[in-house]
């Protein structure tokens, strides 16, 4: 994250909370018109250090960029998963949850079948059958 090896992450995090940084950050955002310099978004703006050469507190406005979180993460963090747009992250999370439920449903079915084969026959109530069919319909619809 920081190229200067003498500067620790802790010092950097403390600096980001300082009054000096807040003033510099406000100037950069104002100069950018309150928009991301890449996509023009006005949401979740961050100020990116192009270089740390000048030292913290002595940054030149020209060495700072105003970006939205999504553009910052995609451009400067190699498009890592944390750099995906919020909607895409939510979509993937929802898909993982759906897949987990599907796996669980299948395993429950396998366990029931095993109990039948091992002489532990289970008779299903009308409610269980209807619940299973409803879950199957929902799963097929998505």
Image: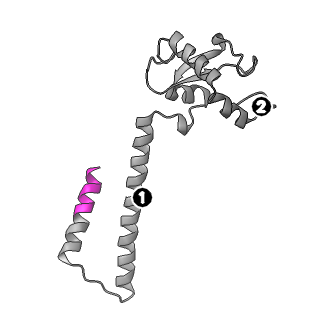
What span is in magenta? 134-142
Q: Above or below — where is 98 with respect to 86?
A: below
**Mark linked to residue 100:** 1
Secondary structure found at label 2? loop
Q: Position of residue 122 (x, y in %)?
A: 29, 84
Q: Position of residue 58 (x, y in %)?
A: 72, 16
Q: Residue at x 56, y 30 (%)?
A: 73
Name the residue that disc number 2 marks: 7
Viewer-nearest residue: 34 or 99: 34
Q: Earlier in the sequence, mark 1 or mark 2?
A: 2
Q: Residue at x 37, y 54 (%)?
A: 98
Secondary structure found at label 1? helix
Q: Residue pushed farthest right?
A: 6
Q: Above or below — where is 102 with respect to 55?
A: below
How dense is the environment of label 2, judged by Cα within 10 Å: few (below 14), some, or many (20 and up)?
few
Q: Position of residue 127 (x, y in %)?
A: 19, 73
Q: Position of residue 113 (x, y in %)?
A: 36, 78
Q: Label 2 near label 1: C-beta < 8 Å?
A: no
Q: CA distance from mark 1 to mark 2?
A: 43 Å
Q: Residue at x 44, y 35 (%)?
A: 86
């Amino acid at each position: 994250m920081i190229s200067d090896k003498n500067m620790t992450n802790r010092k950097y995090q403390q600096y980001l909370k300082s009054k000096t940084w807040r003033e510099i950050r406000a100037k950069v955002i104002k100069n950018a018109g309150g928009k991301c310099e890449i996509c023009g978004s006005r949401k979740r703006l961050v100020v990116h250090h192009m270089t740390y050469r000048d030292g913290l507190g002595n940054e030149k406005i020209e060495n700072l960029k105003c970006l939205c979180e999504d553009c910052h993460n995609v451009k400067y963090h190699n498009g890592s998963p944390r750099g995906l747009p919020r909607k895409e992250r939510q979509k993937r999370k929802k898909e993982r949850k759906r897949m987990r439920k599907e796996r669980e449903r299948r395993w429950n079915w396998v366990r029931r079948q095993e109990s039948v084969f091992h002489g532990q026959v289970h008779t299903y109530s009308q409610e269980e059958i209807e619940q299973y069919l409803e879950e199957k319909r929902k799963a097929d619809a998505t």
